[in-house]
Amino acid sequence: MASPNFSLVTKCFLVVLLGIALVVLNSGYAVAEIPPCETLLTQGPCSNFPDCNQHCLSIGWKCGGLCKAPAPGTPLACLCKI
């Protein structure tokens, strides 16, 4: 029969090993889920923004923006790429 100390050391080693494995396996998934600059955030009608791209850049979105109809038959909206 193994001594109680060996069992405790083994358990601690396995917990640490599991923690390291989880960090290594999940290290790149958060970035891969949402590609940068592909999510669009509606700011309002393009008639309210003379330069939609400049508006989006000025509020901190580094990918800029564009005027696009959110759905067929709707007026153009300023969409910031985030």
Image (cartoon, grey):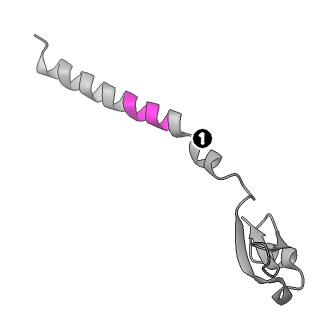
In the picture as drawn, the residue positioned furthest to the front comes out as 73
Q: Is residue 3 magenta?
A: no
Q: Is residue 21 magenta?
A: yes
Q: Write the start and end of the magenta stretch as one range.
A: 17-23
In the picture as drawn, the residue positioned furthest to the left comes out as 1
Judging depth in this view, the residue of 38 and 31 nearest the camera is 38
The quadrant in which the N terminus is found is top left
Q: Give the SS element for disc 1.
A: loop
* Residue pictured at 61% horizontal, 49% vertical: 33
In the picture as drawn, the residue positioned furthest to the bottom comes out as 48
Question: Most prominent secondary structure in the magenta stretch?
Answer: helix
Judging depth in this view, the residue of 72 and 52 nearest the camera is 72
Residue identifier under label 1: 28
| Residue 81 shown left or right of residue 25 in the figure | right
Q: Position of residue 5 (x, y in %)?
A: 16, 21
* Residue pictured at 44% horizontal, 32% vertical: 20
Q: Position of residue 77 (x, y in %)?
A: 79, 79
- The local crowd at label 1, few if under 14, some if 14 to 19, many if 20 or more residues have their Cα within 10 Å, is few
**Number of numbered tags placed on the structure image:** 1
Q: Is residue 44 above or below residue 30?
A: below
* Residue pictured at 80% horizontal, 63% vertical: 63
Q: Is residue 17 above or below residue 45?
A: above
The quadrant in which the C terminus is found is bottom right
* Residue pictured at 86% horizontal, 73% vertical: 53
Amino acid bearing label 1: Gly
Q: Position of residue 15 (x, y in %)?
A: 32, 31
Q: Is residue 3 above or below residue 28?
A: above
Q: Position of residue 70 (x, y in %)?
A: 75, 73
In the picture as drawn, the residue positioned furthest to the top comes out as 1
